[in-house]
């Protein structure tokens, strides 16, 4: 069965019971345990369709290596570690994630990506990277994380603090559709259930507005639609912003 069929069944069968449990405060502890398994199984198929876009985006990473030629990357919300395969050989990685239940999958992904040096793991949110010094990393990466951050504005402020001058923030995320489209209506209908099933993921965010407002010297941002007709996560932004 394809991932879109599994996702539809998941939405139809679980949405209402999950929302009811959520109203009683019982769903969140279950969702944070479920979510890493979903990301590692059927959502992983969805992530595969992002590979060509990621390959193109991350081909720019070596441009931001430090004077020694080594690239120091801080990845926000690593999840199962789907981005490691796109990082250049020898790059040094700091992983962050707020959900400790991803660790099992992250460990596997680290073992499969021995072309990288994994410096350390942080359990802190992108909005508070207190374990990372000012101007200490070349690149910060965030893919499908701005949708669930508590505050995109606070997260970008922290990104700017930890980036060295002329370092870059690489991002890719699903976003709110144009308000005149059917996709936007779908997003509005799905949103309360989606947020609950996908551990706080928002369908109707407009993070490009925060990126434009933040104090980056240059923002290279592209809007694109993924080629799947029903998915409410079709509209995406992809690009990088330079400090
Ligand atoms: C949809 S998953 C994406 C995982 C991975 N970046 C990818 O593209 O496959 C979102 C990830 O962000 C993490 N996350 C959510 N809010 C976060 C925050 N405020 N700071 C850091 N990570 C966060 C979640 O625990 C999860 O691992």
Image: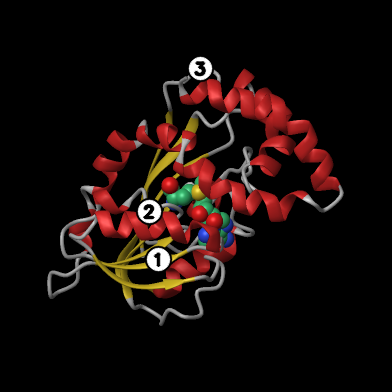
| Location of mark 3 (residue) | 229
Q: Looking at the image, which residue is at 79% across and 39% down?
A: 19
Question: Real-space Cα distance between discs 3 and 2?
Answer: 27 Å
Question: Is 162 situated left or right of 62 in this image?
Answer: right
Q: Tell me whether circle 1 and circle 3 mark residues in contact (CB < 8 Å).
A: no
Q: Is residue 133 above or below residue 186?
A: below
Q: Give the answer, above or below, for where 154 lies relative to 25.
A: below
- Sort mark 3 into few (<14), some (14-19) or many (20+) by Cα contacts within 10 Å: few
Give the camera-side residue of 222 and 174. Answer: 174
Q: Residue at x 79, y 35 (%)?
A: 17
- Residue positioned most to the right: 24
What residue is pinned by disc 2? Answer: 81
Observer able to see residue 41? yes
Badge 1: few (under 14), some or many (20 or more) residues near its Cα, within 10 Å? many
State yes or no: Cβ of the residue under disc 2 lies below 8 Å from any atom of ligand 1.
yes
Rendered position, 98 above or below 15: below
The image position of residue 171, as x and y in percent, is 40, 50
Which tag is nearer the camera, tag 1 or tag 3?
Answer: 1
Image mark count: 3
Residue 101 x/y as whole percent? 54, 59
User: Are discs 1 and 2 less than 8 Å apart at CB?
Assistant: yes
Residue identified by numbered label 1: 95
């Amino acid at each position: 069965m394809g991932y879109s069929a599994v996702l539809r069944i998941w939405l139809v069968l679980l949405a209402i019971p999950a929302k009811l449990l959520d109203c009683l405060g019982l769903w969140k502890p279950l969702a944070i345990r479920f979510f890493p398994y979903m990301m590692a199984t059927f959502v992983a198929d969805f992530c595969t369709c992002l590979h060509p876009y990621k390959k193109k985006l991350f081909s720019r990473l070596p441009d931001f290596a430090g004077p020694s030629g080594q690239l120091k990357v801080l990845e926000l919300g690593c999840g199962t570690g789907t981005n490691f395969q796109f990082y250049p050989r020898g790059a040094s990685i700091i992983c962050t994630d707020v959900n400790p239940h991803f660790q099992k999958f992250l460990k596997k992904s680290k073992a499969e990506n021995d072309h990288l040096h994994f410096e350390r793991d942080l359990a802190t949110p992108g909005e508070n990277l207190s374990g990372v010094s000012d101007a200490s990393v070349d690149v910060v990466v965030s893919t499908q994380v701005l949708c669930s951050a508590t505050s995109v504005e606070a997260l970008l402020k922290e990104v700017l603090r930890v980036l060295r001058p002329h370092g870059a923030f690489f991002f890719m995320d699903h976003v709110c559709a144009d308000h005149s489209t059917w996709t936007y209506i779908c997003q509005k209908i799905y949103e309360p259930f989606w947020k609950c099933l996908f551990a706080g993921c928002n369908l109707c965010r407009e993070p490009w507005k925060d990126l434009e407002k933040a104090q980056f010297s240059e923002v290279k941002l592209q809007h694109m639609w993924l080629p799947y007709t029903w998915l409410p996560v079709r509209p995406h932004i992809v690009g990088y912003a330079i400090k």
